[in-house]
Image (cartoon, rainbow, N blue to C red):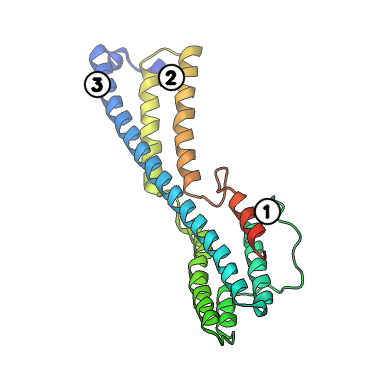
């Protein structure tokens, strides 16, 4: 709007403004297309991670049930599983109350490997125990997906920097062209501010959907509470 005041009049002639409008429409279409594709992609990614996380939680419950069916000798092993899961939940939802922590169980550096060794060390004598032992190992491998999800997603998934720069440059050009074509007044400024907030909101949504285990739109902790309730029963 400041630049408009110092531009020569012939730069804002009807022919010039027509060209500016055409260029702005093209940029606006491109920005809208890129934003819609990014929102769609990140929303699909968020849904995929949520489904995988819920599936891993279900495998943890089934894993605990198989250990329980194996026999009473897996009691300490089941406590270790619950402690490991409890620590993971507290890490990602630090403000939630997951109940008291069992201080008697010492956390392992590699809990999955440690659990696999302890399950393999079980002396399965009956066919049913051998079956439950094999099923518990399989479920543990599937449940270990939680650690990969929580540790890998946040560190590898992010907005590509070139796309962010291109979007910001295009959006800036659009707002510059809008401001050149009209004299400033409160209504115009309010309209431009509203559109700016909308574009910023779309970018914020994309960033949040890329980080399902943190931020404002992180995954709900309700399934985690349900798993802790089911473990040990």
Using residue 212 as the reference point, say whether residue 89 is left or right of it: right
124 over 18 or under it: above or below: below
Which residue sits furthest left?
Answer: 15
Tell me where residue 87 appears, x and y as whole percent.
66, 63
Tell me where residue 149 appears, x and y as whole percent.
50, 60
The structure residue drawn at horizontal position 55% and vertical position 78%, both measured from the top left corner, is 116
- Mark in the foreground, 1 or 2: 1
Q: Earlier in the sequence, mark 1 or mark 2?
A: 2
Label 3 sits on residue: 19
Q: Which mark is residue 1?
A: 2
- Tell me if I can see residue 50 in this picture: yes
Q: Secondary structure at mark 3?
A: helix
Tell me where residue 31 appears, x and y as whole percent.
34, 34
Q: Earlier in the sequence, mark 1 or mark 3?
A: 3
Q: Earlier in the sequence, mark 3 or mark 2?
A: 2
Residue nearer the viewer, 137 or 123: 123
Tell me where residue 191 appears, x and y as whole percent.
46, 18
Do labels 1 and 2 touch, CB within 8 Å?
no
Label 1 sits on residue: 94
| Badge 1: residue crowd in 10 Å (few <14, some 14–19, many ≥20) | few
- Report, in whole angstroms, how far the alpha carbon at label 1 lies from the one at label 3: 55 Å
Using residue 56 as the reference point, say whether residue 166 is left or right of it: left
- Report, in whole angstroms, how far the alpha carbon at label 1 lies from the one at label 2: 47 Å
Using residue 141 as the reference point, say whether residue 114 is left or right of it: right
78 over 167 or under it: above or below: below
Do labels 1 and 3 touch, CB within 8 Å?
no
């Amino acid at each position: 709007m400041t630049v408009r005041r110092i531009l020569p009049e012939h730069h804002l002639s009807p022919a010039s403004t027509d060209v500016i409008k055409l260029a702005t429409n093209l940029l606006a279409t491109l920005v809208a297309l890129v934003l819609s594709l990014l929102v769609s992609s990140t929303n699909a990614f968020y849904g995929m991670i949520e489904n995988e996380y819920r599936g891993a939680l279900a495998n943890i419950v089934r894993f605990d049930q198989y250990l329980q069916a194996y026999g009473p000798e897996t009691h300490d092993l089941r406590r270790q599983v619950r402690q490991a899961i409890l620590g993971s939940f507290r890490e990602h939802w630090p403000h939630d109350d997951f109940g008291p922590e069992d201080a008697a169980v010492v956390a392992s550096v590699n809990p999955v490997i440690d659990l696999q060794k302890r399950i393999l060390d079980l002396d399965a004598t009956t066919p049913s125990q051998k079956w439950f032992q094999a099923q518990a190992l399989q479920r543990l491998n599937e449940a270990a997906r939680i650690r990969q999800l929580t540790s890998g997603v946040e560190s590898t998934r992010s907005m590509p920097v070139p796309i962010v720069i291109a979007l910001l440059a295009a959006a800036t050009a659009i707002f510059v062209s809008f401001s050149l074509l009209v004299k400033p007044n409160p209504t115009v400024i309010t309209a431009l501010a509203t559109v700016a907030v909308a574009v910023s909101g779309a970018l914020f949504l994309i960033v949040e959907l890329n980080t399902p285990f943190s931020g404002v739109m992180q995954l709900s902790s309700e399934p985690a509470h349900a798993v802790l309730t089911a473990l040990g029963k």
